[in-house]
Amino acid sequence: MIDILFPKICLLCDNSLEKTIICRSCSEAFSFIDNARVCDVCGVPYSSLSEQKLHLCGNCISNTESLLKVRSVLLYKDKLRDLLHYFKYSSKMYIADFLSDLVIDRFPSDLSGFDIIVPVPLHIRRLQERGYNQTVLIGKVLAGNLGVRLDLFSLKKVKYTKPQVDMSNFVARAKNVKNSFHVSNKKMFSGKTVLLLDDVYTSGSTIRECSKQLIEAGAKYVFALTIARAV
């Protein structure tokens, strides 16, 4: 049983290991985001100190009324991209514990005071195809660690859409997910600050569409946290 839960070789290479799933060499290849050097709103990492002094990126300067703050833990590239692909498409659900530990250890300090955690839902057809929602697995561990309520049913994916990775640009991604989410229990979010959880932030279309529905349902504010952010 232990050999099943903890393979004797690294998931991402042929190195041997003990009591973990990723070897030190692969773990050291992960690129953590310094959330002290990101846009205050959308969380895009700054490439220079001069940008950091602005506090907001160019896009957010022109949209100062946003009720969405986004933070991510890691950059979506190299070894982490491979690991997340295993997690989502290879039924290796035990990876959730490893990723949850990373999120908890590097949880952004400016995300606090939220009342409820909501993982981005999958459409029922996608859930049946995959067998599980990888973001829910992370959400369960995170909610238990933080002592915050987890809601898995009030925000629903009501339209089956193509995978966002298949979309060629930001406009296509936004169109793909438009009106694809719905809040079935608005009382759950009335006056609440919500932490919206997803695995990867690419264009932000999914996060923004979910946030829109939560705000329209009465949420006071929405934070969004992802494991990774596309470079």
Image: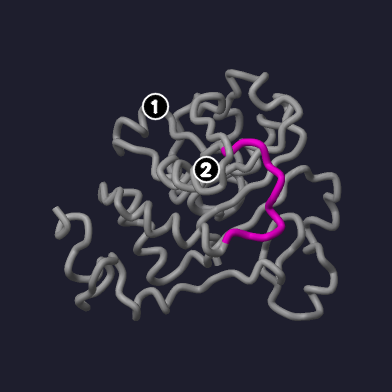
What residue sits right under mark 2 in the picture? 143
Tell me the kind of residue under disc 1. Ile
Q: Does the magenta stretch include residue 110?
A: yes
Q: Which of 70 and 3 is in front in this view?
A: 3
Residue 183 location in percent, x, y?
60, 23
Which residue is label 1 attached to? 124
Q: Residue at x 42, y 58 (%)?
A: 99
Q: Quadrant of the C terminus?
A: bottom right
User: Secondary structure beneath disc 2?
Assistant: helix
Judge from the rendering whether residue 28 lies leftward or rightward of residue 151; answer left or right: left
Residue 184 visible in the picture: yes
Disc nearer the start of the sequence (1/2):
1
Image-based side of 200 in relation to 49, left or right = left
Viewed as shown, does residue 74 lie left or right of 204? left
Residue 46 image point, x, y percent: 70, 72
Instruction: Say which residue appears at 66% left-offset and 66% top-offset.
Output: 35
> What crowding class fits label 1: few (fewer than 14 Cα within 10 Å), some (14-19), or many (20 or more)?
some
Residue 170 visible in the displayed image: no
| Residue located at (52% from left, 43% from top) | 143
Residue 186, given in percent of the width and then of the height, sits at 66, 20
Q: What stretch is highlighted in magenta?
A: 107-117
The residue sitting at 50% across, 25% down in the picture is: 153
Q: Confirm or deny contact between disc 1 and disc 2 (CB under 8 A).
A: no
Please say whether residue 119 is one of the residues in the magenta stretch. Answer: no
